[in-house]
Image: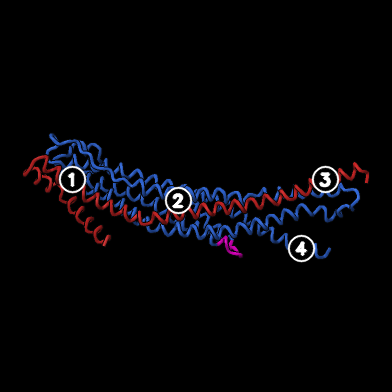
Amino acid sequence: MEEKLKSALSNAIEEFNNKSASILQLAYTSGGQTAVSNVEQGFDALRELYFEILKHQLDENNTLYEQLISAANTEAESLRTSINLLNNIDDILNLVAAVTSSIAQILTTLGV
Amino acid sequence: MKHLSKLLIILLLSSCASTKILDLGGKVSTLGTEVSQKAIDVFTLLSQQADIDKSQQDKVKVLTNPNPVNMPLPNTKVADFSKQLASRIKAYQSLMYLYKIFGLLTEGNYSDKTKEAMSALKDSYNSLGELPDIPPNVSSKLPEVSKMLTQVIQAKKVHAHNKILFNLTQLYVSLWNVDQNIWNDYLDRIYGDYALGLNTVDEKKYDVKKISENSKDPYSDESIIILMYKLEKRDEIIKQKNAIKKQLSDFGKALNELNKAHGEISKGNTDISDVIKTLNSIDTLIKN
């Protein structure tokens, strides 16, 4: 239905564009600048309606974009966890080294 | 000792493959950031079209008015798509942020840091006088082994996150494929209406002498000179529209290739030459 309306509007806009010079001349002859403005407003209204349909079609995906943002943020958190894991391997090794070094110092001090 | 050698050989082989995966992961992360940036550039370009359309329609109204002497200054309403563009820009900003973090996962300094930490641990252990020192042949290999182990873990993580990035970018591709058709309709409307509008401008409104001064065409008939000028203008407008459409199309292709690269890297047996080919294609598409 929406596509049909879009196509009909598109045809009407193109029809006007192709004959705009004669349509506007006819309007001017019959009613001066006011009539020209009225015809132009009618043409603008057709285009605005066409753009509204495009916006509506884009809006249909807006919820999915919101879900994508949420999914991307969740994956960013998951990546951070993976990175922390890699950092933890070094942290654990450094901690064990520090503890071992302390034990060595205690043993030296005690003269064991 | 025999088992240790076997373990070292396995680790060495795994580590070679892991290094390649980490390298590919790093490249795909850089290109992922660039593709996301390209998306934001494309949406910025689209956001400029509303003002271009307004200006073009105002011009057509002046040129097609039967008596412009007493016409009011035209002021066509701007078709505002900012709400639709904002949600899309935000989605690609999130994707760009994701690629920046993914880049951290592929960095080589984790394995180097592990190697350093293992050296420190080995030195600490050897300083314990009462315990036997680690044999020199084992001691010399320990930091390298730990480095390889970290690389293998890192590569496994890169595989796993590529699987997630594959699924995620597949959604971005699907949504873009739908959006692209709508944006193409939008551009056809803006530039098509302008081209047709200019085409209807009355011949009397053109200064033939001025057109001839700037033209190399050998025509003397006034109608032909004006028609040739109109054709030239129409071609310029179509060229401008097609250049924007190409940006949209190239971005879509790059996004699709990025998805393909994630799919290949997420496999256990990644075809490295295939991924490199895909990454080169992305590079060409986003730099066009």
Q: CA distance from mark 1 to mark 3?
A: 85 Å
The range drawn in magenta is B264-271
Q: CA distance from mark 1 to mark 2?
A: 36 Å
Q: Amino acid at mark 2?
A: Ala
What is the display colour for chain B?
blue
What is the display colour for chain A?
red
Q: Which residue is mark 4?
A: B7
Asked if one can make out residue B288 in the rendered structure from this viewpoint, the answer is no
Q: Amino acid at mark 1?
A: Gln
Q: CA distance from mark 4 to mark 1?
A: 80 Å
Q: Is residue B266 magenta?
A: yes
Q: Which residue is mark 1?
A: A41
Residue neighbourhood size for the residue with mark 3, other residues' Cα within 10 Å, grouped as few (<14), some (14–19), many (≥20)? many
- The N terminus of chain A lies in quadrant: bottom left
Q: CA distance from mark 3 to mark 2?
A: 50 Å
Q: Is residue B5 magenta?
A: no
Residue neighbourhood size for the residue with mark 1, other residues' Cα within 10 Å, grouped as few (<14), some (14–19), many (≥20)? few
Eye-nearest disc, 3 or 2: 3
Q: Which residue is mark 2?
A: B91
The answer to whether tags 1 and 3 share a subunit is yes
Q: Is residue A75 left or right of residue A3?
A: right
